[in-house]
């Protein structure tokens, strides 16, 4: 079967994307395409853009319809531009297709956006006359959940794993749609229409044949057919109400459970904030340590100069000390000479000096005075050279090692990573805590009780109408036997045709049941194959499917583990992923899979196993991930199948989000 492959998405003023933005998928869209970004960077908006372009309506994680006015970019709104557009370029059935959906509103109101909506679908460059029909034919909206989902939506599938979970009938119906069961059901309904047509013709013929008996039979038969049709329509309408109500109850129960987790989340927030404060303090300490190292860094630069200066100062210091010593010796010599000249005696032996000796002393005295003048008039040695030398030596001794600075930088980066990880987790917790009213849980409980009461009433009405239909069918069967006994050739032919249609209808009825069982077995086998690739516990042998298309784990010993016995949200999630993977393998429709933050509750081992399996899941896989889910080095698990690697960055309220390529830089302004 030919798949739908998305090649490019163009967005104008959609959500956080201000102005024109383009996301192109390399390799003609085939392969795995990573779109990275933290919380609030615009990942979910990309998935919503695709769904809105296809179906014109999107829902939040609680199943509530998102207002069109909230899809407009804030900056565009402030500038008075109320138009936003999404274009999807894709291939299907060997042709190039393009879906364009946009608004032409002139006022920022939901009604104006709905009235001014445009939808155009191009096939091979030519516009198609019925775009909504073409889209639904390619990828029906009621099965889009199997191709576009997030971690929160996986809860729907996990709920399905409980066989007793009655409110998941709508999901069962969607699964049967994916597997092609409605094709048989539609054929059966068509046969009923044909059969009713011939029964009406038989009634008309009976009236033409005349006779009170035949006329009464014809009228009775006509009344029965009309009443059965009325009942079928009524049952279908009530069934739709029941499914919608079950969906509403499921959403409210999920919201209620989330609200009951508020206290736990509040404590978690406090703990995370405490951890962040601790890491911030560590970061501050390391920054001060780094600052101190940087302050000393100039010494490393001056080291060669300082070494040369030390050598020069050592020479100058020795010269200064030598001069000082010579000066001191000259001063002492002058003192001795002066004393000898004054006393005219030798100061050592007391001998009276001769005139010639005195003259010699006087000459030496003058020479020593001149020598002192040459050695400067400083009475103390010049110690500044020694002091400078010691200062430089001390500086050389306190130089830093480049490794010390590198190590501190690495520690700061690691601390910053931990802080960002905690902040991302904190933002997620705050998002779940935001907007929770203290009275809302109680109000929701009352609403759920009323809804479940109404659901019980609807089920009772459906059961009552089914019994009424059964009685009418019994009456009709008796009537058909009477009509069959009427010896009229034309009636006989019509009776044979009607009987033949009934036999064919019964064949289709049995075929539907047989096809369901075959598809269930196929899904079970495929899910088991996937599960074995991504499981972490070897004692888990295979999966067993239930009537709701949910799965139980079967151990090597044959023990059946239902959801309540697994005690691991990660194991619930891999079973749910196994089911989704199996449904995509067995589906009648082949389309891209877009997964928004689906690995939040998986540990490292499960995460790696899931990543290794993903290349087998679909021809085109778009992964919207955070750095907590897709860590550095995880690319190796995808076997080189990554064809596009983009990063989203939020640049503030005015500029919004932009798309960055990890290889070529900025993609859109």
Image (cartoon, rainbow, N blue to C red):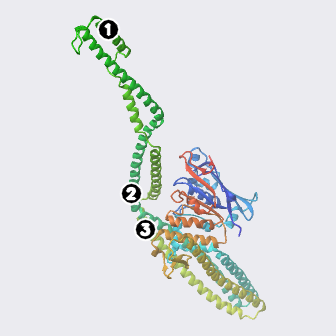
The quarter of the displayed image where residue 196 is located: bottom right
Residue appearing at x 38%, y 59% in the figure:
267
Of badges 3 and 2, the one in the foreground is 2
Give x and y (percent) for residue 280: 41, 49
| Marks 1 and 2 close (CB-CB < 8 Å) | no
Label 2: few (<14), some (14–19) or many (≥20) C-alpha neighbours in 10 Å? few
Give x and y (percent) for residue 639: 62, 63
In the image, taking residue 249 as reference, residue 666 lies left or right, namely right
Q: Nearer the viewer, residue 10 or 602?
A: 602
Q: Which residue is mark 1?
A: 360
Q: Nearer the viewer, residue 328 or 640?
A: 328
Q: Which residue is mark 3?
A: 445
Of badges 3 and 1, the one in the foreground is 1
Q: Earlier in the sequence, mark 3 or mark 1?
A: 1
SS for dot 2: helix
Q: Earlier in the sequence, mark 1 or mark 2?
A: 2
Q: Which residue is mark 2?
A: 271
Give x and y (percent) for residue 51: 61, 60
**Is 347 drawn above or below residue 102 in the view shown?**
above
The quarter of the displayed image where residue 68 is located: bottom right
SS for dot 1: helix
Of badges 1 and 2, the one in the foreground is 1
- Distance from disc 3 to disc 2, alpha carbons, whole Å, reads 29 Å
Q: Nearer the viewer, residue 232 or 579?
A: 579
């Amino acid at each position: 079967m030919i798949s739908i492959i998305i090649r490019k998405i163009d967005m104008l003023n959609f959500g956080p994307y201000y102005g024109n933005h383009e996301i192109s998928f390399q390799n003609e869209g085939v392969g795995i395409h990573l779109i990275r970004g933290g919380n609030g960077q615009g990942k979910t908006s990309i998935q919503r853009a695709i769904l809105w372009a296809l179906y014109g309506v999107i829902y939040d994680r609680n199943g509530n319809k998102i207002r069109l006015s909230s899809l407009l970019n804030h900056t565009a709104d402030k500038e008075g531009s109320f138009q936003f557009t999404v274009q999807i370029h894709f291939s299907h059935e060997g042709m190039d297709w393009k879906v364009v959906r946009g608004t032409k509103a002139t006022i920022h109101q939901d009604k104006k956006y709905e009235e001014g909506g445009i939808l155009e679908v191009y096939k091979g460059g030519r516009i198609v006359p019925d775009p909504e029909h073409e889209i639904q034919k390619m990828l029906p909206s009621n099965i889009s959940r199997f191709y576009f989902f997030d971690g929160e939506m996986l809860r729907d599938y996990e709920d399905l794993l409980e066989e007793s979970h009655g409110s998941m009938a709508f999901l069962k119906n969607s699964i049967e749609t994916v597997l092609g069961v409605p094709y048989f059901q539609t054929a059966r309904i068509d046969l009923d229409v044909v059969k009713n047509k011939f029964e009406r013709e038989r009634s008309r013929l009976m009236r033409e044949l005349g006779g009170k008996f035949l006329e009464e039979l014809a009228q009775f038969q006509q009344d029965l057919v009309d009443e059965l049709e009325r009942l079928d329509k009524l049952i279908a309408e009530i069934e739709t109400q029941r499914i919608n109500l079950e969906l509403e109850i499921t959403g409210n129960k999920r919201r209620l459970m989330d609200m009951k987790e508020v206290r736990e989340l509040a404590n978690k927030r406090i703990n995370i904030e405490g951890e962040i404060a601790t890491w911030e303090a560590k970061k501050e300490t390391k920054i001060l340590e780094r600052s101190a190292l940087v302050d000393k860094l100039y010494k490393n630069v001056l080291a060669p100069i300082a070494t040369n200066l030390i050598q020069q100062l050592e020479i100058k210091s020795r010269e200064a000390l030598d001069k000082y010593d010579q000066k001191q010796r000259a001063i002492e010599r002058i003192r001795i000479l002066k004393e000898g000249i004054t006393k005219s005696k030798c100061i050592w032996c007391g001998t009276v000096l001769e005139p010639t000796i005195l003259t010699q002393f006087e000459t030496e005295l003058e020479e020593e005075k001149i020598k002192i003048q040459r050695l400067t008039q400083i009475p103390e040695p010049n110690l500044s050279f020694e002091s400078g030398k010691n200062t430089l030596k001390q500086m050389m001794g306190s130089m830093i090692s480049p490794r010390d600075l590198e190590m501190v930088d690495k520690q700061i980066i690691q601390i910053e990573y931990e802080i960002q990880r905690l902040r991302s987790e904190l933002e997620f917790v705050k998002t779940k805590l935001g907007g929770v009213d203290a009275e809302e849980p109680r109000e929701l409980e009352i609403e759920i009780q009323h809804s479940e009461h109404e659901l019980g009433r609807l089920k009772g009405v459906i059961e009552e109408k089914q019994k009424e239909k059964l009685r009418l069918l019994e009456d009709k069967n008796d009537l058909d036997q009477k009509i069959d006994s009427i010896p009229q050739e034309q009636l006989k032919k019509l009776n044979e045709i009607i009987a033949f249609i009934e036999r064919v209808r019964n064949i289709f009825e049995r075929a539907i049941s047989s096809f369901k069982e075959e598809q269930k077995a196929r899904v079970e086998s495929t899910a088991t194959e996937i599960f074995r690739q991504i499981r972490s516990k070897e004692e888990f042998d295979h999966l067993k499917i239930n009537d709701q298309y949910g799965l139980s784990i079967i151990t090597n010993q044959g023990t059946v583990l239902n959801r309540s016995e697994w005690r691991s949200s990660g194991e619930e999630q891999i079973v749910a992923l196994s089911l989704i993977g199996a449904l995509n393998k067995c589906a009648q429709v082949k389309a891209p899979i877009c997964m928004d933050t689906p690995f939040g509750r998986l540990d490292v081992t499960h995460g790696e196993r899931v990543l290794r399996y993903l290349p087998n899941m679909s021809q085109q896989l778009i992964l919207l991930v955070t750095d907590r889910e897709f860590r550095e080095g995880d690319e190796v698990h995808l076997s080189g199948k990554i064809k596009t690697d983009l990063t989203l960055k939020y640049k503030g309220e005015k500029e919004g989000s932009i798309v960055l390529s990890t290889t070529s830089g900025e993609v859109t302004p």
